[in-house]
Amino acid sequence: MQYDETLTISGLYSELGVFKKTDNTGKNPFLGFTKTIVFKTPNKKNFK
């Protein structure tokens, strides 16, 4: 998986405004937003 996950994730959180909300739930933000991030990523061909 070669992609800028930091910029993609922080950018996605900024748009949705759910960074704090997700963090407060105690859940791993990567798990809930993986699918959304994939579609926002130019290298989505690396995912299935």
Image: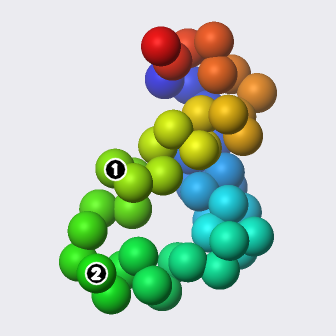
- Mark 2, secondary structure of its residue: helix
For this view, does 35 lie left or right of residue 14? left
Image quadrant in which you'd find residue 12: bottom right
The image position of residue 24, as x and y in percent, is: 33, 87
- Marker disc for residue 25: 2
Q: On screen, 43 above or below 45?
A: below
| Three-letter code for the amino acid on which mark 1 is drawn | Leu
> Which residue is drawn at the image coordinates 68% and 71% (left, top)?
16
* Residue closer to the observer: 25 or 42: 25
Identify the residue at the far left of this view. 26
> Which residue is drawn at the image coordinates 26% and 68% (left, top)?
27
User: What colouring style does the render use?
Assistant: rainbow
Q: On screen, 47 above or below 20?
A: above
Disc 1 versus disc 2: distance between alpha carbons? 12 Å
Q: On screen, 35 above or below 27?
A: above
Closer to the N terminus: mark 1 or mark 2?
A: 2
For this view, does 26 lie left or right of residue 34? left
- Marker disc for residue 10: none
Q: Label 1: how many residues lie within 10 Å, few (<14), some (14-19) or many (20+)?
A: few
The image position of residue 10, as x and y in percent, is: 63, 65
- Mark 1, secondary structure of its residue: helix
Asked if marks 1 and 2 touch (Cβ < 8 Å), the reply is no
Image quadrant in which you'd find residue 41: top right
Q: Mark 1 — residue? A: 31
The image position of residue 18, as x and y in percent, is: 56, 78
The image position of residue 20, as x and y in percent, is: 48, 86
Q: On screen, 29 above or below 25?
A: above
Image quadrant in which you'd find residue 11: bottom right
For this view, does 29 lie left or right of residue 47? left
Q: Label 2: how many residues lie within 10 Å, few (<14), some (14-19) or many (20+)?
A: few
> Which residue is drawn at the image coordinates 67% and 34% (left, top)?
39
| Three-letter code for the amino acid on which mark 2 is drawn | Thr
